[in-house]
Image (cartoon, rainbow, N blue to C red):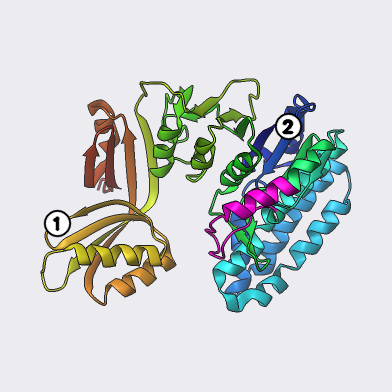
Amino acid sequence: MKVFKFGGASVKNADAVRNVASILNAYKHEKLLLIVSAMGKTTNHLETVTEGFFFDHPNKKEALNNTLNFHINICRELFGMENEVSKEIRKEFLAIPDIIAKHKDAGFDTVYDQVVSLGEWASTKIVSSYLNHANLPTLWIDAVDCIKTDNIYREATVNWPTTEQQISKTILPLFHKYDFIMTQGFTGQTDEGMITTLGREGSDYSAAIFSYCLNVDELTVWKDVEGILNADPRKFKNVSKLERISYKEAIEMTYYGAKVIHPKTIKPLQNKNIPLRVKSFISPHDDGTIISGLSEENYPPIVVLESEQTLLHISTRDFSFVAEHHLSKLFALFAEHRIKVNMMRNTAISFTVCVTHRTERLKNLIQKLDEEFTVDKNEDLELITVRYYNIEIIEKLKQGKIVLMEERIKNTLQMVVKEISVPERI
C-alpha cells in the first residue's frame, strides 16, 4: 500500500486532471490512498472570498462567482456538461455567505477553516469523479471523518490516538473492495464537528498522517519539479537535483523555509521509517528524490529564500540588561500571538528577531510589547539561509543587498538582507 499526494499545480485545470489519470493508469493494480490539494490557486481565491464576506468588501460576490465558475468550467471540460458533482459544488459554494454569517461571532480563523477547506473538498470531488469516468474506480471519503484535531483553527494539532483509530477503522476495510481511495489534504475536524485546517500547504502533512496510520510502504508527493532541488529554480540558474537526502536534512530545509514539503511532514514518516519520494507529474517516469534514513554524505550548497520578513528590535525602556525573565516573557508573547522566530540575536539591552510578516499578528504583538519595551521594526526584508555554504556562494548572494543581520554556525549561514535601491541617473 502506498500514499500518493497531488498538489494544486497537478490539478490546476482539466488537462492537469487528465494527466493525473494518465499517471494513475500505470498503478491501477496497486492499493493507493490518494490525497489531493485544492486546484491551482483556489486556496488564495477562497481566502479572498472569506475576507470579502467577513469584512464586507465590495467585490465579495464577484470573487465568489469567479471561484465557483472556475470549478464549474473544469467540470464542463472534463465531462462535457454539468453533472452531479458540479451541482453539488455549486450548492456548497453558494452557501458560503450563510456559513460565514453563522460562524462570524467565533472569529475570523474559525470562519476561515469552514470556507477555505472547501477548496480541497471540491478538488477531490472533481478528480475522483473523473477517475471513475476514466475507468479507474475510485472511492471518495471525507478526510474530516479520519483526521481529528484540537480547535486551534488554521493551525490545528492532530489528536494522534483518535486519528490512528479512525483511519484504521474507516479506510483499511475499504481496500478489500477498492484499489484507489481518495480524500482531501489540509483538513481535519474537532470533537464538536467543526472543520479545521492543518496550516498553509498542509496537504503534505495530511499525506504523512495517513501514511503513518496505515503503515504504508512509501509516500510519493507529485510536484512540478523533477525532485528536491538545491535552490528555487524560479530565482536561480543552474540548480541541481538532490538524488537522496536524509530525514534530518529534509527537516532542516523545511525548518528554514524550503517550500518543497510542509515542515511537519517528515516526523511521522521518520518515526516509522517510511520513505518519501518527490516526483514530477510532468516527467512521471523519472526517479525524483528519495527522503529516507539513508542519504548522501556530501551535499552541495542548499539555498532557501524567505521574503516578507520583518526585523523587530526590542529594547528595555530603562536600559537594564535583557535578562532571562525578559526573554521568558518575550517568547511567551511570541507563542501567544503565534509568531515563529526565524532568527534572533541579543545584546546587553536589546533583543532582535526576524519574523515572517503577518500584519494582524504583528500589530497585536507590538501593542503588547509596547507596554514594557521600546520596539522598532524594519520591514520588506529577505531571509537567506545557506546550508553547506562556501565563500563563493555567500558573496554572490550578497550582491546588490545590505546585510542587516548575519549568523554562522556549522553547516548553516543566515542573513537578513535588504535590496539596495539604486537612484535613477539624472
Name the image quarter holding residue 357. Answer: bottom left
Secondary structure state at the residue bearing disc 1: loop
Looking at the rendering, in which quadrant would you find the N terminus?
A: top right
Q: Residue type at mark 1?
A: Thr
How far from the left and from the top, in percent, is residue 30? 76, 28
Q: Secondary structure at mark 2?
A: helix
Task: Check if mark 1's residue and mark 2's residue have beta carbons within 8 Å.
Answer: no
Circle 2: is it few (<14), some (14-19), or many (20+) Cα within 10 Å? Answer: some
**Residue for badge 2:** 19
**Image coords of residue 167 (percent x, y):** 69, 48
Image-quadrant location for residue 106: bottom right
Please tell me which residue is depicted at 38% across the width and 72% down the height of the picture: 364
> Given the image, on which type of amino acid does mark 2 rest?
Asn
Residue sitting nearer the eye, 202 or 397 = 202
Is residue 57 visible in the rendered structure shown here? no
C-alpha span from label 1 to label 2: 55 Å
Residue, disc 1: 347
Q: Nearer the viewer, mark 1 or mark 2?
A: 1
Horizontal side, residue 144 vs residue 175: left or right: left
Residue at the spot 56% in from the left edge and 24% down from the top edge:
288
Residue 123: give x, y in percent of width and height. Answer: 72, 48
Disc on res. 240: none
